[in-house]
Image (spheres, rainbow, N blue to C red):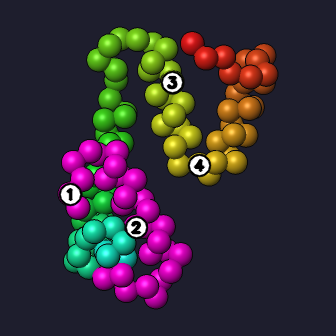
Amino acid sequence: MKISDRAQRLERNSAIFALAKSNPRLPLKDIGDRFGLTAAGVSLILSGHRGKRVLNRIEKLERQPSQTGDKEFDAVNAVMSAIADLSEPARHRVVEYALARLGETTPEAP
């Protein structure tokens, strides 16, 4: 199964990392079978030769200034980048705290 979309690839690689971490004795071939990859492909992802390169490219793109010049869009991207590595409960706490500091109780959709 070939994945051309970066977001899908990133999601697949994250799932591979999570599965390998939660089941360290699971053979690479079994992990690969679940995702349509060979054991060598899984090894490349886990060793960082494939997965981290993709992650680094995505992070680099997220850090670049917006080409649109939209300050609101840039602010949202800055917030999303800042909380990207946090767990879901931590993200929720950060957003709640930021809204409280701004005097809001719930976010409003644009």
Tell me if residue 13 can be seen.
Answer: yes
Separation (CA) of disc 4 from disc 3:
16 Å
Query: Which residue shows up at 47% across the image and 71% down it?
Result: 19
Query: Which residue shows up at 32% across the image and 76% down it?
Result: 33
Q: Looking at the image, tell me whether mark 4 or mark 3 is earlier in sequence order.
A: 3
Q: Looking at the image, tell me whether mark 4 or mark 2 is earlier in sequence order.
A: 2
Please state the extent of the stretch shown in magenta in the rendering: 1-30
Q: Which residue is mark 3?
A: 76
Which label was assigned to residue 2?
Answer: 1
Q: Looking at the image, tell me whether mark 2 or mark 1 is earlier in sequence order.
A: 1
Q: Which residue is mark 4?
A: 86
Query: Which residue shows up at 79% across the image and 22% down it?
Result: 105
Q: Quadrant where the N terminus lies? A: bottom left
Q: Is residue 19 magenta?
A: yes
Secondary-structure class at tag 3: helix
Separation (CA) of disc 3 from disc 2:
29 Å
Q: Is residue 85 left or right of residue 66?
A: right
Q: Which residue is mark 2?
A: 16
Query: Could you tell me the amino acid type at mark 1?
Result: Lys
Foreground label between 1 and 4:
1
* Neighbours of disc 2 within 10 Å: few (<14), some (14-19), many (20+): many
Secondary-structure class at tag 4: loop
Q: Is residue 50 left or right of residue 85?
A: left
Secondary-structure class at tag 2: helix
Q: Looking at the image, tell me whether mark 1 or mark 4 is earlier in sequence order.
A: 1
Quarter of the image where one finds residue 29:
bottom left
For the residues bearing labels 4 and 2, Cβ distance under 8 angstroms:
no
